[in-house]
């Protein structure tokens, strides 16, 4: 029985959960343990021993959305990463029903592990209304199918990573998502600073249908992917390869998203990203997600820790 007003995926993840898109949908399918309390499982980020931030943000949005009527999709979220998540332990999400108004609904979610908050999110939901319309134009980019897939791109740079398992781990972590860089990624641009801009096309590796084909599911999948590459533009400005090559120690600090127009996560989306500033051991990046037909669907802003590792000796 689906206890989610939005019809989000249901059924608790199991130890032998499938991989790829079915595995990601299982990961985003939280167990309801009380009216406004949910529990989720985790997987480790591919290159660091902590939970991937996009997973926590997406699960928190699932928890918030399951307490909101289906006719009020999320239009924004604002969140902070407080502590690293432990991939070996479940995460408990507690939802606070801040406000249920005539047009808007507000929820606050706290994610807890080992008795301590690791993440908190505020999300706002709105009943559909007609209003003013305008948007920035979509940039001109190559067709996604003309660009190399991750399976084609990553092995080309295996020699840069040092550890031969890095490619395998990165591919496994992104098995649910077909993500294609428009230009060379940071790990291919080490030592060659360039304009702090990065673009990727993405979609799920498989179509969403049945209970998974739900507006909340599409929003949560975009939230998950939005944390994968957003800090790339900061690295590009300094010719740094990032976590894959070990020349930056970083982590997400906060994450905000605004959902402007409907979209499908199983259809191609362009993620246009840039960094206006880096200072004080932090970097700021902002992104725009467009549908393939040019609709501006989502705006994203994130700040992250950006520290250069100290030389040994």
Image (cartoon, helix red, strand yellow):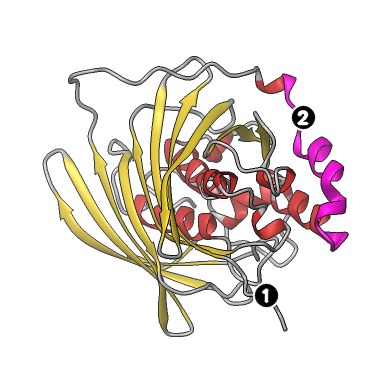
Q: Residue at x 49, y 52 (%)?
A: 1
Q: Identify the residue shown where x is 53% and y is 72%.
A: 85
Magenta highlight range: 146-165
Residue 248 at what x, y percent from top left? Answer: 61, 62
Task: Tell me residue 140's x, y (percent).
Answer: 54, 16
**30 within the magenta span:** no
Question: Which label lies toward us, 1 or 2?
Answer: 1
- Going by the image, does 103 lie left or right of 231? left
Q: Residue at x 40, y 64 (%)?
A: 280
Secondary structure at badge 2 equals: loop
Q: Please, what is the dominant secondary structure of the magenta stretch?
A: helix
The answer to whether one can see residue 63 in this image is: yes
The answer to whether 312 is drawn above or below residue 141 in the figure is below
Does the magenta portion include 148?
yes
User: Can you identify the residue that label 2 sits on?
Assistant: 148
11 displayed left or right of 177? left
Residue 76 at x, y = what percent? Answer: 31, 44
User: Which residue lies at the image location 67% right of the left edge and 52% below the top edge?
Assistant: 241
Cα–Cα gap, marks 1 and 2:
35 Å
Q: Nearer the viewer, residue 26 or 197?
A: 197
Of the numbered discs in the image, which one, if any, rests on residue 311? 1
> From the viewer's perspective, is 280 left or right of 101?
right
As displayed, is residue 78 above or below residue 150?
below
Pick whichever, 88 or 313, lies toward us: 313
User: Mark 1 and 2 residues: CB-CB less than 8 Å, in contact?
Assistant: no
Q: Residue furthest left?
A: 102
Q: In this rendering, is residue 277 above or below 274?
A: below
Q: Residues within 10 Å of mark 2 (few under 14, many from 20)?
A: some
**Secondary structure beneath label 1:** loop
Residue 29 visible in image:
no
Figure quadrant of residue 115: bottom left
């Amino acid at each position: 029985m689906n206890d989610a007003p939005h019809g989000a995926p249901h059924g608790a993840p199991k130890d032998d959960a499938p991989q790829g898109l079915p595995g990601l949908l299982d990961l985003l399918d939280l167990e309801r343990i009380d009216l406004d309390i949910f529990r989720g499982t985790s997987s480790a980020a591919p290159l660091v021993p902590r939970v991937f931030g996009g997973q926590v943000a997406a699960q928190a949005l699932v928890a918030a959305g399951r307490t909101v009527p289906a006719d009020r999709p999320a239009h924004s979220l604002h969140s902070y990463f407080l502590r690293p998540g432990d991939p070996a332990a479940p995460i408990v999400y507690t939802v606070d029903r801040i406000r249920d108004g005539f047009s808007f609904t507000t929820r606050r979610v706290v994610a807890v592990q080992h008795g301590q908050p690791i993440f908190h999110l505020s999300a706002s939901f709105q009943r559909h209304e007609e209003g003013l319309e305008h948007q920035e134009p979509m940039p001109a980019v190559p067709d996604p199918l003309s660009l190399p897939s991750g399976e084609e791109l990553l092995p080309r740079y295996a020699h840069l990573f040092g550890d031969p398992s890095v490619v395998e781990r990165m591919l496994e972590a992104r098995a649910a998502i077909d993500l294609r860089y428009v230009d060379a990624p940071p790990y291919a641009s080490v030592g060659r600073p360039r304009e702090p801009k990065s673009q990727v096309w993405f979609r799920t590796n498989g179509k969403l249908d049945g209970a998974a084909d739900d507006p909340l599911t599409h929003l949560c999948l975009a939230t998950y992917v939005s944390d994968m590459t957003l800090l790339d533009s900061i690295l590009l400005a300094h010719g740094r390869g990032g976590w894959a090559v070990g020349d930056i120690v970083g982590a997400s600090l906060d994450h905000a998203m605004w959902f402007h127009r409907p979209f499908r996560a199983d259809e191609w989306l362009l993620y246009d990203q840039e960094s206006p500033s880096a200072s004080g051991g932090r970097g700021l990046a902002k992104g725009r997600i467009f549908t393939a037909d040019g609709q501006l669907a989502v705006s994203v802003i994130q700040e992250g820790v950006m520290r250069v590792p100290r030389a040994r000796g």
